[in-house]
Amino acid sequence: MQFLQLIISGSAQGCIYGLIALGFVLIYKATETVTFAQGDLMMLGAFAGFVLMTLLGFPFWLSVLCSIAAMAVFGVLAERVVIRPVLGQPAFSIVMLTIGMAYIVRGLITMVPVIGTETHTLPVPYKDMTLRVGELVLAYEQLVVIGATALLCLGLYALFRYSKIGIAMQASSQNQIAAYYMGIPVQRLNGLVWGLAAAVAAIAGLLLAPITFVHANMGYIGLKAFPAAVVGGFGSLPGAIVGGLIIGIVESLSGFYLPEGFKDIAPYIVVLLMLMIKPNGLFGEKLRKKV
Amino acid sequence: MRFIFKTDYDQDIRIVKHGGQAFWYGLLGLFLLAAPWLLSEYMLAQLVFVLIYATVGLGLMLLAGFTGQFSIGHAAFLGVGAYTQAVLTNAGWPFPLALACSAGLSAIVGIVIGVPALRVKGIYLGIATLAFGFIVEEGLARWESVTGGNAGMHVKSPAMFGWVLDSNTEFYFLCLVVVVLSTLAILNLLRSPTGRAFVAIRDSEISAQSMGIHLARYKTTSFALSAALAGLGGALYAHKIKFLSPEQFSIIQSIDLLLMVVVGGLGSVHGVFLGAIFLITMPQLIAMGKDYLPDSVGQSPGLQAVVYGVVLVAFVMFEPHGLYGRWLKMRTYLQMFPFYRAGMFRRQKSFQKSDRLK
C-alpha cells in the first residue's frame, strides 16, 4: 500500500515536471531554442492565479482561465521582443538569454510590494480534501494534477493531429524553410508556440501551487524538468510526459527507500545514466548530419 | 592605423604582436606589481577576487569559448578544487603541492564528466554538466567527515615549510603568479596544434573530424584543462574566503561564471579579465545605486537578479561579442577615424543553423 501511495504522489509530482518539460519540448521543436525560463514562467502563472483569486476576488474558474490567457499573451510578447531578434545566433547565446529572462522575471516578482517576498497558499476549492479508496489516502490536489495533465495531453494531441495550426507547427518544426515555401507563416507560428508553452507553464504553476506554496523561487523546479525532457528524448511531446513521470516516481521512491539526500539528486543521476546509455532518450529520434 | 610588415611566419603566432602591445602590457604588469602599495586594502581584496575569478574564467573560456562545449556545472570543479585545497592545507601540506593536487583532482573529475560528453552534444551536454553540478554540490554537503557538510569548514592560510602567507600582499602575489602563469599557458596552448584543434572542433565538429582531429581525445583534454584551471581558481578562492560551505558552489555560481565569459566576450582571453572585473564590480555598483532608488525597489532582494538579467539580455541582444568586442569596435573607430562603417563587425545571420543535425 505504501508503495502504491508513493507511486501516486510521485506521479503527481512527475506530471508537473512533465508539463514543464512539455514547454521545453514545444519550444525546442519549433525554434531549436532551449529555454531556461520555463520554470519562472510557471511561477509567474501561479502568481497571476494567486493575485486574481485573492486580491481581485475572481471566482476560481475565471481566474484560472484569465491567468492562462494572460501567460499565453506574455509568452507571445516575450518571443516577439526578446527571442525573435536573436534567432540565428549560436544556441548557447539564446540559452543565456533565457537565463537572463528568468532572472528578470524572478527579480521583478520580488519587487512587487507586499506579495513578492512572501509565500502564499493558493485558495483552490479542492484544498485539503482527501479521497479514501480502501487503505489508500489520496489527496485531491494530486488527483487533480494527474487528471488535468491527462486532459491537457489529449487536448495537445488533438491540436497537433487534427487542427490546421497544429499541423503547420509540426511542419515548421521539421523543416522551417520547406514550411515557409508552403506558405506557412513560420515566424508567427513560433510566437504562438511560445504562447502555448507559456500557457502550459501557467497550468503547471496553478496545479503545483496547492501542493507547495506560491513564492518567487518556485521556478527552480524547472531545473528538474530538464532531466524529464532528456529522459523522454528532447524532441518528443509524449516523451516529455513519460520522462516527467519517470523522474517524479524515481524521486518519490528514492526519498523513501534511500538515505537522506538522494531524493534531490536522483533525477540527475537518472539523466546522467540515460545520457550514457541512450543519449537520444526513450522516444528521441536519431538524426545525423549528412555531409 | 597600424600596419605590421610581416617578414617571417613566426610573426603570425607571436604572443606580443608589436611594440605597442609590449608597451601597454608592460605598463599593466608594472601596475600589478606595484598594486599592493598603490591601492587601499579593500581595493586590493577586490583585485584578488578579480584574479581568482579570472583563473576560473580562463578555464571556462577554454571550454566554452574555444572548444564550444558548454558547461552549466562549472562550479562543481571550483568546489572540488576548493575542498581539496582546504583539506590538504588543513592537513599541513605545503601550498604548491596542495595547489597541484587541487588542479589535478579537478582535472580527473573533468575527465570523468568529459567521457559522457563524447557521446552527447549541445544542450544535452549542458544538461549533463548541470546534473553533474547538482550531484557534486549534494556530495559536498553529505560527505560530512571530510567537508564538514552544510556547517562548512574553515581554511588555514597557505603555508610552506614554516613560511605562512597570511598577509594580504603575500596572498595577492601568489594569485598574481598563478594568473599570469595560467594566462601564458592558455595563450601558448591556443597557438599550438592542440589549441587549433579546439577551435576547429568549435567551428565544426564534422569538418574537424574530417581533417583528422581525434574528437574524443581533444574534447576530453579540453574538459580536463578547463577543470584543472577551475580547480586552481577554487583553491585560491578557498584561501581568500577562508570558510567553505556547499552552497557557494551551487547552480547560481555556475551561472555567474557563464555570465562572466558571456559578458566578457566568448572566444577572447581579454574577455575573461573584463568579465571578471565586471562580475566583481557589479555588486558594488548595485549597492551604490541602491540609495537612489525607491525603497521597494532598492531594498528588494531581487534587485541584483534583475540587473544581472538585464545585462545578460542586453549583451546577447546588442553586443554578442561582449565587452571585448565593444572595445575592439571602439578601437577600430578611433584608428580608422573617420572611415568607420556601422556594419564592419556585423556577422552573417544564419537562419537554418540546426543543432539537431550535428
Image: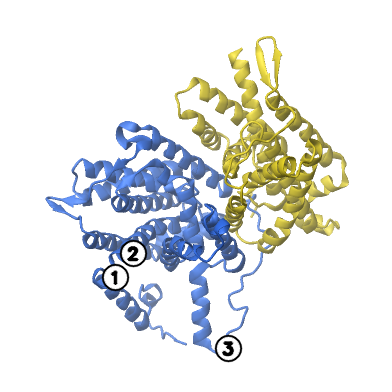
Chain colours: A yellow, B blue
Quick check: do tags 1 and 3 share a chain? yes
Frontmost of labels 3 and 2 is: 2
Q: Chain of mark 1?
A: B
Location of residue B7 with respect to B102 vertically, above or below: below
Determine contact: label 2, label 1, CB under 8 Å: yes
Say what secondary structure mark 3 lies in: loop
Sequence-first disc among 3 and 2: 2
Location of residue B187 with respect to A96 vertically, above or below: below
Give the percent coordinates (x, y) of residue A165: 85, 48
Frontmost of labels 2 and 1 is: 1
Sequence-first disc among 1 and 3: 1
Residue B39's tag is 1
The residue that mark 2 highlights is B47
Of residues A12 and B136, the one nearer the viewer is A12
Frontmost of labels 1 and 3 is: 1
Q: CA distance from mark 1 to mark 3?
A: 40 Å
Q: Chain of mark 3?
A: B
Say what secondary structure mark 1 lies in: loop
